[in-house]
Image (tube, grey):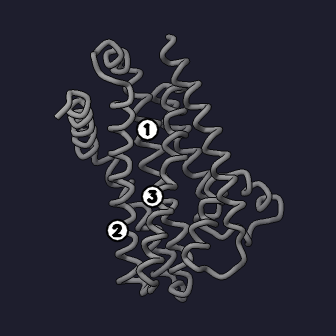
């Protein structure tokens, strides 16, 4: 085993151990998406008719939390405590630090998705071909990455207290205004137009198209917009990282 890979494994193991020791992170991350989905797709009378539709949108909601909070608040707190300065001084690659957090985020995102998928299949009676389930899972997991970049920007630019507030604003704002909780079509016209500037709207439209939800959707358009937004977030993250390293 090479030293680089061994260093990455140790970093990833430490990151996972830290996450599993933080119930204030695990409980909301895994519990809130499935609680919201169960309420709107099962408990409300007649909501079963929308269970497949809501699975597509709440899957995006499920992966946002681990990405935004796992990076935004975690990185900001580690900056405040001087851990990033210590890591820069240690003979460890920066990519191991980021990669370990990405692995942790993908694990918790996958766990959250697995819980929602089980509830959808067994409690909400959502039935789709295996290929559709697979494609939907693929879309949901990939949707994690734009929010990872957003979380990194927050973590590199804000202190711990500010990161908590700003992460919550983005998390709740993107969820509500991007159509993850309530379909955008019921919004006033001005809010519908504003939703087109949010990544959650375009990601949910892609997920809805994959799941076969009713309605016409231009998947190519939404993919292009998501790609542009991701590149912008990547550039912002690199700028924030360079600013952090120059301090």
Name the spot of residue 166 as percent of width and height, x first: 56, 38
Kindly state the secondary structure of the residue where label 2 is placed: helix
- Residue at left offset 34%, top offset 53%: 108
> Which image quadrant: the N terminus?
top left
From mark 2 to mark 3, how far is it between C-alphas? 14 Å
**What residue does disc 1 label?**
71
Please name whichever residue, 205 or 80, is drawn nearer the observer in this view of the structure.
205
**What residue does disc 3 label?**
141
From mark 3 to mark 1, how far is it between C-alphas? 16 Å
Q: How dense is the environment of label 3, judged by Cα within 10 Å: few (below 14), some, or many (20 and up)?
A: some
Please name whichever residue, 108 or 134, is drawn nearer the observer in this view of the structure.
134
- In the current view of this chain or complex, which residue is farthest to the right? 189
Please name whichever residue, 63 or 137, is drawn nearer the observer in this view of the structure.
137
Name the spot of residue 93 as percent of width and height, x first: 34, 24
Name the spot of residue 5 as percent of width and height, x first: 24, 34
Q: How dense is the environment of label 2, judged by Cα within 10 Å: few (below 14), some, or many (20 and up)?
A: some
Kindly state the secondary structure of the residue where label 1 is placed: helix
- Asked whether, in this view, residue 53 is left or right of residue 91, the answer is right
| Figure quadrant of residue 38 | bottom left
- Asked whether, in this view, residue 114 is left or right of residue 162, the answer is left
- Residue at left offset 55%, top offset 46%: 146
Q: How dense is the environment of label 1, judged by Cα within 10 Å: few (below 14), some, or many (20 and up)?
A: many
- Asked whether, in this view, residue 131 is left or right of residue 8, the answer is right
Can you say whether 35 is above or below 152 in the image? below
**What residue does disc 2 label?**
115
**First of labels 1, 2 by sequence position:** 1
Residue 53: assigned label: none
Kindly state the secondary structure of the residue where label 3 is placed: helix
- In the current view of this chain or complex, which residue is farthest to the left? 1
| Figure quadrant of residue 95 | top left
Name the spot of residue 17 as percent of width and height, x first: 22, 41
| Figure quadrant of residue 215 | bottom right
């Amino acid at each position: 085993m090479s030293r680089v890979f061994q260093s990455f494994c140790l970093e990833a193991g430490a990151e996972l151990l830290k996450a599993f020791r933080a119930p204030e992170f695990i409980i909301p991350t895994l519990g809130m998406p499935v609680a919201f989905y169960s309420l709107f797709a099962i408990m409300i009378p007649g909501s079963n008719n929308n269970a497949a539709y809501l699975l597509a949108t709440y899957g995006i909601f499920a992966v946002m939390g681990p990405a935004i909070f796992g990076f935004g608040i975690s990185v900001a707190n580690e900056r405040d405590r001087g851990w990033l300065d210590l890591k820069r001084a240690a003979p460890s690659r920066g990519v191991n630090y980021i990669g370990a957090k990405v692995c942790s985020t993908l694990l918790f995102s996958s766990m959250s998705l697995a819980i929602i998928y089980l509830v959808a299949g067994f409690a909400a009676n959502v039935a789709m071909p295996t290929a559709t389930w697979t494609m939907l899972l693929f879309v949901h997991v990939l949707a994690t990455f734009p929010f990872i970049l957003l979380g990194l920007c927050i973590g590199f630019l804000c202190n711990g207290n500010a990161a908590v507030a700003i992460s919550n604003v983005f998390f709740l704002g993107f969820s509500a205004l991007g159509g993850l909780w309530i379909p955008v079509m019921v919004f006033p016209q001005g809010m519908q137009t504003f939703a087109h500037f949010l990544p959650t709207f375009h990601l949910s439209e892609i997920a809805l198209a994959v799941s076969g939800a009713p309605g016409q959707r231009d998947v190519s358009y939404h993919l292009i917009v998501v790609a542009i937004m991701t590149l912008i977030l990547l550039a912002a993250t690199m700028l924030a990282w360079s600013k952090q390293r120059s301090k």
